[in-house]
Amino acid sequence: MAEDPSAPVVVITGASAGIGAALARELAGRRASLVLTARREEVLRELAVTLGGPVEVVPGDVTRRADVERVLERAMARFGGVDVWVNNAGRGITRPSFEAITEQDVDAMVRDNVRSVLHGMQVVLPHFKARKQGVIVNVSSMLSRVPLVSFRAAYSAAKAAVDALTEAARAELAKDFPAIRVVTVLPGVVATEFGNNALGGGPDSRSLPGAQPVDEVARVIADGLFAGPVDLYTRPGYFEMVLAHLRGLAGHPSA
């Protein structure tokens, strides 16, 4: 398929499975040009073949800044620029209790969920500033706002750090670069292999009651790239859940 110069160019990290792969399929259907990165090159290339549009596959590990820089370089070489950068790569963890969390667990969660996002934001921001526009999307979790699943405590903490980085960048850019949009995506339980792939294993997310279909999450993200709230909850009612949680912490359940 010929490349459309008017099509948005979207980078997706962690694109080999789960939300990342579903988002790639959704955006390909909307005729976006895609740059997909993950560690599993063969899986990425198999996905790219099914998409039917312009796709650049860049295997790499986004916890390494040099790999992230290479993603931008390849996007620039193929498409001449980037319109949207989606920091989706991440990993969960399962530990039987808060006391069981080790220093190594914390390091792994920061590496996989925070460092990867920080690299993506810092690498693409000079490009967006030069253009005075662009969209950064950071995929977080409802567990960053309502961290009540104790066996995911270290993951919740890492995703809360992602939220803080996102909001800090948004505030910093608001005055001089108002056309750079910084979005936080807040899914709940999604029917992917997230649980199976967590450090220490855990329940299969696809088997949990009420797990949101991954294609539905992808549609919500795609719809919210360029307009709408910058805190993007993937299901109605999630925001109210956060408010109820905060009211309970404040001691005002009916406020």
Image (tube, rainbow, N blue to C red):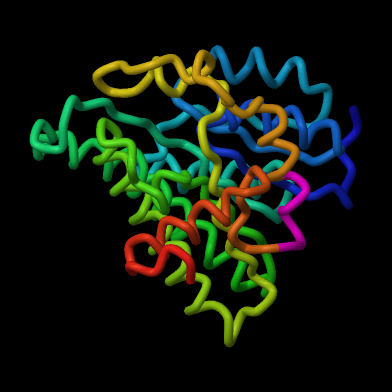
Q: Quadrant of residue 75?
A: top right
Q: Residue at x 40, y 44 (%)?
A: 143
Q: Residue at x 82, y 28 (%)?
A: 53
Q: Is residue 225 on the magenta stretch? A: yes
Number of numbered discs on residues: 0
Q: Considering only vertical position in the picture, is 112 above or below 144?
A: above
Q: Residue at x 66, y 36 (%)?
A: 217
Image x and y of residue 40, in percent: 48, 18
Q: Quadrant of residue 47?
A: top right
Image x and y of residue 77, in percent: 66, 45
Q: Nearer the viewer, residue 136 or 193?
A: 193
On the picture, is 166 further left or further right than 75?
Answer: left
Image x and y of residue 185, in percent: 57, 49
Residue at the outermost front position: 254
Q: Is residue 17 visible?
A: no
Q: Quadrant of residue 247?
A: bottom left
Q: Considering only vertical position in the picture, is 178 above or below 243?
A: below
On the picture, is 25 further left or further right than 240?
Answer: right
Residue at the outermost bottom position: 175
Q: Residue at x 69, y 36 (%)?
A: 218
Q: Quadrant of the N terminus?
A: top right
Q: Is residue 105 on the magenta stretch? A: no
Task: Point out the stretch of residues depicted in magenta.
Answer: 222-228
Q: Nearer the viewer, residue 208 or 168?
A: 208
Chief secondary structure of the magenta portion: loop
Q: Is residue 145 visible?
A: yes
Q: Nearer the viewer, residue 109 or 246?
A: 246
Q: Nearer the viewer, residue 73 or 178?
A: 178
Image x and y of residue 58, in percent: 55, 31
